[in-house]
Amino acid sequence: MSANLIPILWEATLQTMYMVAISAVLGTLGGLPLGVFLATSQRGELLSAPWINKVLGLVVNAARSVPFIILVVAIIPFTRMIVGTSIGTNAAIVPLTLAAVPFIARLVENAIREVEAGLIEAARAMGATPMQIVRKVLIPEALPGITLGLTLAAVSLIGYSAMVGAVGGQGLGDLGIRYGYQRFMPEVMLAVVVILIVMVQLVQSLGEWIAARVDRRAARNRGH
């Protein structure tokens, strides 16, 4: 590979990291509270609001069922309205975030539903309010699962960020298409694939390490 391509490859890597990091943060800010609400708002639960739960559940399912590449194209007018353009890294963050929110919401919901019901009942017996139970019992107990869920979301976003290269986004996907495919430079395509694999491995390893560190259940078992 030409030495001239190394700075281009480095810039594309930074663009991908930027897109993934920002969309992961924004997706978490939207998906985390949504997931908590979905997990606690069915009939008879802490924040019982069954009709709102049902409507939000339908919206989340609908959003998750749309293939990402179609979502990118379908919301181009919305993307232009938000960032003023439909191409580039900032534009790519919009569909990446919209794809991340419902995905993270379901992962968070599943993690919270795995918390033992006995802990909730014990907190209720001690007079804790629903919001106190959410903040001090559900989220701390579900934190390992939430962390692994966010790790999975970040890995998925890395893959999605490569897809936006096909529709005007920048980053490694765009570089792979423009140089590796259109200019018949397989060494560039190979470099892009290797970098993406390394990024996924690093994110996965970091997420698993954090999940192990915040696992209260493992700490309690060690204490026994």
Image (spheres, grey):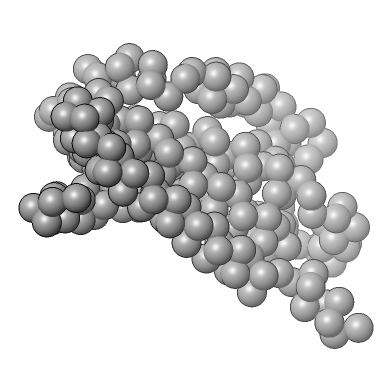
**Which of the pair 118/88 is nearer the observer?**
88
Left or right side of 148 for 5: left
**Which of the pair 88/130 is nearer the observer?**
88
The quadrant in which the C terminus is found is bottom right
Q: Relative to 140, does residue 48 appear above or below in the rendering? A: above
Q: Is residue 28 visible?
A: no
Left or right side of 213 for 219: right
In which quarter of the view is residue 113 placed?
top right
In which quarter of the view is residue 169 placed?
top left
Q: Percent position (x, y) of residue 153?
A: 51, 45
The residue at the point 75 percent across, 32 percent down is 42
The residue at the point 71 percent across, 43 percent down is 110
Q: Percent position (x, y) of residue 142?
A: 70, 57
Q: Relative to 18, does residue 57 appear above or below in the rendering? A: above
| Count of marks, rendered view | 0
Q: Percent position (x, y) of residue 7?
A: 13, 56
Q: Is residue 126 visible?
A: yes
Q: Percent position (x, y) of residue 167?
A: 25, 23
**Which of the pair 179/140 is nearer the observer?**
179
The residue at the point 49 percent across, 47 percent down is 155
Left or right side of 23 for 67: right
**Which of the pair 20/171 is nearer the observer?**
171
The residue at the point 66 percent across, 22 percent down is 54
Q: Relative to 52, does residue 37 appear above or below in the rendering? A: below
Residue located farthest toward the left when viewing the structure as drawn: 4
In which quarter of the view is residue 70 placed?
top left
Q: Relative to 13, does residue 104 appear above or below in the rendering? A: above
